[in-house]
Amino acid sequence: MNVVTCDAARHSAAILAIFNDAIANSTALYDYKPRAPESMVAWFEAIAKGRYPVIGAEDESGTLMGFASYGPFRAWPAYKYSIEHSIYVDARFRGRGLGRVLLREIIAAAQGQDYHVMVGGIDATNAVSIKLHESLGFNHCGTVKHAGFKFGRWLDLAFYQLIFRTPAAPVDG
């Protein structure tokens, strides 16, 4: 397995396929309709504008097995040291420890960019993701009951956070 920085030209189609599988078959994304290929242009542009990473895991043949990224936690300026991350692993490659590798990589990237808090919004029934996050030091910080509705049922969204020692000298404004 190789850890790579994903780019639009090389990885858009694979990331889109992973997103759309998560939309159609899980509660990892609280979305109903598959995303169109054009949506990846705006997604990668937003990532680039915010200087956020997209870190991937590829197999020996270059197939993207999963990816992780982060973006702003909230849009207001005082949240500038907080980010919200996402990790998605292609269904064909789950159970191989890729989520752990990707989460560690995205944590290191966030610390390197001087963020202070990493937040994960996880469907409360996703025991595997919750266990992974807890094993890497994330703490449960709240659950929004009935935050979403999908597959004919209400979904609870659990929030987990990891607090970093960075930045060394935070500033207002």
Image: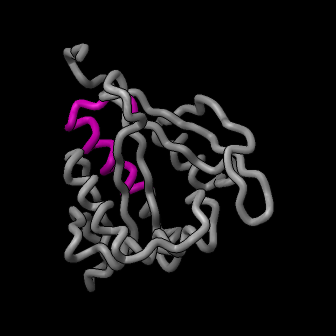
Q: Residue 78's quadrant in the figure?
A: top left
In reply to whether residue 114 is colored magenta, the answer given is yes
Q: Residue furthest right?
A: 152
Q: Is residue 2 above or below residue 60?
A: above
Which x, y percent locates residue 90? 47, 73
Which x, y percent locates residue 18? 45, 73
Pick whichever, 168 or 32, lies toward us: 32
Q: Is residue 142 above or below residue 42?
A: above
Q: Main secondary structure of the magenta part?
A: helix
Q: Residue, x 44% and y 52% (percent of image)? A: 86
Which x, y percent locates residue 98? 42, 63
* Left or right of residue 44, residue 15 in this image: right
Q: Residue 62's quadrant in the figure?
A: bottom left
Q: The C terminus is located in which quarter?
A: top left
Which x, y percent locates residue 110? 28, 40
Q: Is residue 32 above or below residue 78?
A: below
Count of marks overlaid on the render: 0
Q: The N terminus is located in which quarter?
A: bottom left
Q: Residue 87's quadrant in the figure?
A: bottom left
* Left or right of residue 25, residue 100 in this image: left
Q: Residue, x 54% and y 44% (percent of image)? A: 121
Q: Residue furthest bottom?
A: 61
Pick whichever, 10 or 148, lies toward us: 148
Range shown magenta: 100-117
* Left or right of residue 121, residue 18 in this image: left
Q: Residue, x 24% and y 65% (percent of image)? A: 6
Pick whichever, 29 or 5, lies toward us: 29
In reply to whether residue 84 is colored magenta, the answer given is no
Q: Is residue 20 above or below residue 147?
A: below
Which of the colour schemes (rainbow, by chain, secondary structure, one colour) is used?
Answer: one colour
* Left or right of residue 5, residue 161 in this image: right
